[in-house]
Image: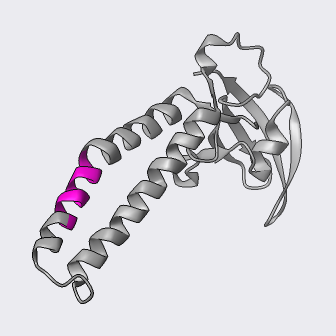
Amino acid sequence: MQQIPMTVKGAELLRTELEELKSVKRPQITAAIAEARAHGDLKENAEYHAAREQQGFCEGRIQEIEAKLSKAQVIDITKIKNTGRIIFGATVTVLNVETDEEITYRIVGDDEADFKQNLISVNSPIARGLIGKEEDDSVSIKTPGGDVDFDILKVEYV
């Protein structure tokens, strides 16, 4: 069984979503199905079919989250000694050599990635190019937009 790397925050978010789905959404959908059934003929009852469809999506998401959590390898980066080497969970400040722009990325699991918040997936081209490098290294990373040169300014385990 292949483990899925995940930060502590990412695991907490999935557990929160799972709890919400099980304790709030599922009972709401069950109530909607019961109410729609009370309206009579199920063949032509759009409310019933919509509620059943919602139920399918909800149950599918519950199964998906439970599977991810069962395979999760939760990594607490704050408990690892900072060696200056970029690893999963590290927060990295880099300088784009071409544009002279300073950017801070945090390397996270696939489910947590949000490029707008500078949370990049461990499987993204930038993260793969940075992993294993150290503070003060220079690196050239192949991205979909072409090669990008970075100077690694700071590596934090926060």
* Residue 50 appears left or right of 93: left
Query: Relative to 120, does residue 88 appear above or below in the rendering?
Result: above
Residue nearer the viewer, 77 or 92: 77
* Residue 107 appears left or right of 22: right
Q: Main secondary structure of the magenta part?
A: helix
- The residue depicted at 64 percent of the width and 41 percent of the height is 109
Is 27 in the magenta? Answer: yes
Residue nearer the viewer, 136 or 37: 37
- The residue depicted at 48 percent of the width and 57 percent of the height is 60
Residue nearer the viewer, 49 or 67: 49
* Residue 7 appears left or right of 26: right
Question: How many numbered marks appear?
Answer: 0
Query: Relative to 16, does residue 47 appear above or below in the rendering?
Result: below
Q: Position of residue 80 (x, y in %)?
A: 68, 13
Residue 84 lies in what quarter of the image?
top right
- Where the N terminus falls, by quadrant? top right
- Where the C terminus falls, by quadrant? top right
Please report the bounds of the magenta region as a residue range.
24-33
Q: Position of residue 40 (x, y in %)?
A: 13, 81
* Residue 112 appears left or right of 53: right
- The residue depicted at 40 percent of the width and 42 percent of the height is 18
- The residue depicted at 34 percent of the width and 48 percent of the height is 21
